[in-house]
Image (cartoon, helix red, strand yellow):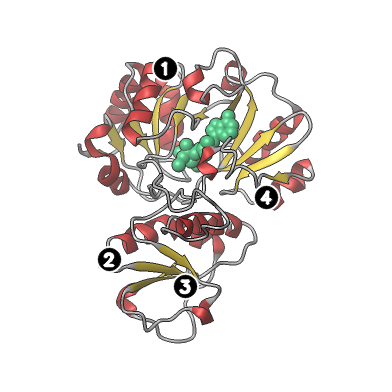
Amino acid sequence: MTISHPSRKVMRRAAAVIRSGGIIAFPTETVYGLGADAFNPLAVARIFEAKGRPLFDPLIVHIADLSQMSRLASPVDKRAGRLAGRFWPGPLTLVLPKHTAVPGIVTAGLDSVALRMPDHLIALDLIRRSGTPIAAPSANRFGYLSPTRAGHVLEQLGERVDMIIDGGDCAVGIESTIVKLTEGASIILRHGGIPAEEIEALIGPVKMDHDTAKNPEAPGQMPHHYSPSVPVELAAGIRQIDFSRRDAGFLLFRKPGFDTPADRTLFLSESGDLKEAAANLFSCLHLLDRMEIQVIIAEPVPETGVGAAIMDRLRKAARRKKGADADQDPEAGEEA
Ligand code: TXA
Ligand code: MG
C-alpha cells in the first residue's frame, strides 16, 4: 500500500473506488477516517473487517451538503438545524432519528444515525465526487490510537484498505464531539473538538452521558479505547510525576520550569495552549508508543474547552493497563 497525494487524478480514482464498493482512508480535520459508500452494506462491512471492529459499534455518516441530511435522518429538529448551522463543517457529530433508507449495518441496528460534515477540503471533495454520503470510523485498528497523519493509517491498516489519501496532519487532532438529540434531551455522548460549553451556549443545557461505559450505546465510550500498546498512567499533577524513573516516557501538558529527561519527554503544547495540545495528543502518543519504555506517564490538562476531550482520551488510555481501576470498572484491562 502506498500513500497517495490528493491530485485531481487521485481524487477521481478515489471516488471511483468508493462508488464500486471500496474502502478509503482519508483526512478530516479531526482524525483520518476509513470510508465507504454509506448506502452500500457490503462496502461498509469491509470497514468493520479491516478495523477488527465489532458490528455493534455504529459508524458516523459524513456529508458534504445539508441537502444530504434528509436522506439519512428524519425528522431533523430545530436544535439540529442550529447546531449544524453554527458548527458545520466542523468537529461535531449529531445523532438523530434514522431514515429507513440507511442500512442497518451503518447504525448497528439502532434507530438513530450519527451525521457529520467534516471541515476538510479533501474529505468534502471525496464525498461530492463519490455522489454519496460516506460512512467512516477513525482509520485505526479497533481500540488503538486514532490516526492524525497518513503514516499512522499505513502502520495500522496497510494492505487492508484500497487507498490512503495523504492530507498531512489533522488540524484539530481529536475526534468530533457527539451530541444525541432526542425529544426530551440533548446528550453529549463523547467529548471532542467542539467544547460542551459552546454547544450549551447555543441550545441550552445538555446532559453528559456517564452511563455509556456500562451501556455501550456509543461504544467508542468503552473504557479501553484510544490506547497505545505501552500502558499509560495518568498522574495527579506535575508534582506527583517521578522523573527519575528510567523505564518511563513523559507526556506533559506544557513545559515546566525545571528540566525533564529530554529524550523521553514530549510536550502537548510548550506554551500550555489546549487547542495545540489536542492537535498533538495522538501523534505524541504514537511517538511514545515507539520508544523503548515500559510506561507512559501523563500530566493532566485543565478540563475546560477541548481539555475535557483530551482528559477523556487520557483516562481511557490509562484504563487499558491491566488491573487499573478494576474496582470501578469490571471491563478495564480487557483487550478491545
Ligand atoms: O471525528 C470523528 O468523529 C472521526 C472522523 C473520522 O469523522 N470519526 C470517529 O468515528 O471518531 P469512530 O467510529 O471512531 O467513533 C464514532 C463514535 C463511536 O463511539 C460510535 O459508537 C458512535 O460514534 N456512534 C455512531 N453512531 C451512533 C449512534 N447512532 N448512536 C450513538 N453513538 C453512535
Ligand atoms: Mg475511533
Q: Residue 55: where, in percent of width, then height?
A: 44, 28
Q: Residue at x 35, y 41 (%)?
A: 141
Q: Nearer the viewer, mark 1 or mark 4?
A: 1
Measure how far apart labels 3 and 2 are at the Cα level.
21 Å
How many C-alpha atoms fall within 10 Å of the one at disc 3: few (<14), some, or many (≥20)? Answer: some
Front position in the image: 256 or 123: 256
How many C-alpha atoms fall within 10 Å of the one at disc 4: few (<14), some, or many (≥20)? Answer: many
Comes first in the chain, label 3 or label 4: 4
Comes first in the chain, label 2 or label 4: 4
Position of residue 215 relative to residue 256, above or below, is above
Badge 4 marks a residue whose secondary structure is helix
Q: Nearer the viewer, mark 1 or mark 3?
A: 1
- Quarter in which the N terminus is drawn: top left
Position of residue 290 relative to residue 267, above or below, is above
> Which residue is situated farthest in the top direction here?
101
Q: Looking at the image, do the residues carrying marks 1 and 3 touch, with CB atoms under 8 Å apart?
A: no
Q: Residue at x 55, y 55 (%)?
A: 312
How many C-alpha atoms fall within 10 Å of the one at disc 2: few (<14), some, or many (≥20)? Answer: some
Q: Nearer the viewer, mark 2 or mark 4?
A: 2
Q: Which mark is residue 41?
A: 1
Comes first in the chain, label 3 or label 2: 3
Q: Which residue is mark 2?
A: 291
The amino acid on which the numbered mark 2 sits, given as a three-letter code, is Met
Q: Which residue is mark 3?
A: 270
The amino acid on which the numbered mark 4 sits, given as a three-letter code, is Ala
Q: Residue 23: where, in percent of width, then height?
A: 33, 27
Q: Residue at x 34, y 57 (%)?
A: 286
